[in-house]
Image (cartoon, rainbow, N blue to C red):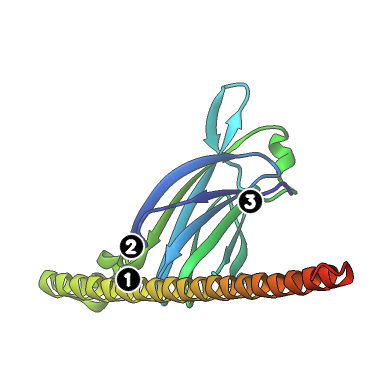
């Protein structure tokens, strides 16, 4: 397996991402999503295979699979599962921060298009955007007003999570800054002590030298 190609999505944690990318038969593609804690994430993808004769991307064969792996900011595996040529994965964050989402093809099936390319369409939904409100309305028999109120409550809850995450980031930044300032202070103190000790040693050495030469 080749080295993963990392793509940083510098969008806010609440929203919808829609993109596509190309991968080779041994290539892994990873994305980094900044996600608050206790936030649901849904990813939908579909693959297309490059047809050399027609020179166009066509729907992949059912035998072609994609492996999805998600790691939290601490490097713990949140999700690791094999899917088909088209699929949907879901996970909930339990630690705020950068989550790594990696996809790579099923290498045992890639001989079907050896040397070719695979186009992957990926859609990532984070927060309240991951909720299927028409399905919720039908299941809970909600009126339009009740459904709208439900949406507003979910949005407020997601905004609160985002604010908590921003406070968490500010706290981490403050601790890092304080730690850096403390290290700089101690390094300055150490340098000063070393200079003073070096000066004292030089003075004593010179005094001994002059006394030995009977110059003083």
Q: Is residue 57 left or right of residue 27?
A: left
The Cα–Cα distance between marks 1 and 2, rounded to whole angstroms, is 8 Å
Mark earlier in primary sequence (1, 2): 2
Tell me the residue at 63%/51% (across/down): 104
Q: Distance between the residues labelled 1 and 3?
A: 30 Å
Q: In this view, does 49 lie above or below 73?
A: above
Between disc 1 and disc 3, the foreground one is: 1
Count the labels in the image. 3
Residue 162: mark in rendering? 1
- Vertical placement of residue 177 versus 4, above or below: below
Asked whether residue 148 is in view, the answer is yes
Name the element at disc 2: loop
Mark 1, Cα crowd under 10 Å, few <14 / some 14-19 / many 20+, is many
Graded by Cα atoms within 10 Å as few (under 14), some (14 to 19) or many (20 or more), the crowding at tag 2 reads many
- In the image, is 160 to the left or to the right of 8? left
Q: Nearer the viewer, mark 1 or mark 2?
A: 1
Residue 196: quarter of image: bottom right
Crowd rating for badge 3 (residues with CA inside 10 Å; few <14, some 14–19, many 20+): many
Residue drawn at point x = 71 percent, y = 44 percent: 26
Residue at the location (37% across, 62% down)?
Answer: 13
Name the disc covering residue 112, or none.
Answer: none
Q: Is mark 3 on a helix, strand or loop?
A: strand
Position in image of residue 206 (x %, y %): 78, 68
Q: Name the residue under label 3.
A: 104
Residue, disc 2: 14
Residue 2's place in the image compared with 116, above or below, is below
Task: Locate residue 129, reporting x and y percent.
Answer: 31, 63
Q: Nearer the viewer, residue 161 or 166?
A: 166
Q: Position of residue 174 (x, y in %)?
A: 42, 74
In the image, taking residue 37 as reference, residue 199 lies left or right, namely: right
């Amino acid at each position: 397996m080749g080295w993963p190609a990392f793509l940083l999505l510098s969008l806010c944690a609440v929203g919808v991402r829609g993109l596509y990318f190309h991968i080779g038969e041994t290539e892994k593609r990873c994305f980094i999503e900044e996600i608050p804690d206790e936030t649901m994430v849904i990813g939908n993808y579909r693959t297309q295979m490059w047809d050399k004769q027609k020179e166009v991307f066509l729907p992949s064969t059912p035998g072609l699979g994609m492996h999805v792996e998600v790691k939290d900011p601490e490097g713990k595996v949140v999700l690791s599962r094999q899917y088909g040529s088209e699929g949907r994965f879901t996970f909930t964050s339990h630690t705020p921060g950068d989550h790594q989402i990696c996809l790579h093809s099923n290498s045992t099936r890639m001989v079907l298009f050896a040397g070719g390319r695979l186009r992957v369409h990926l859609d990532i939904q984070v927060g309240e955007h991951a909720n299927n409100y028409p399905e919720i309305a039908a299941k809970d028999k909600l009126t339009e007003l009740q459904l709208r109120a439900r949406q507003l409550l979910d949005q407020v809850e997601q905004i609160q999570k985002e604010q908590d995450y921003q406070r968490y980031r500010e706290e981490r930044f403050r601790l890092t800054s304080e730690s850096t300032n403390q290290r700089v202070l101690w390094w300055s103190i150490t340098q000063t002590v070393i200079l003073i000790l070096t000066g004292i040693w030089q003075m004593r050495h010179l005094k001994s030298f002059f006394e030995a030469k009977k110059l003083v």
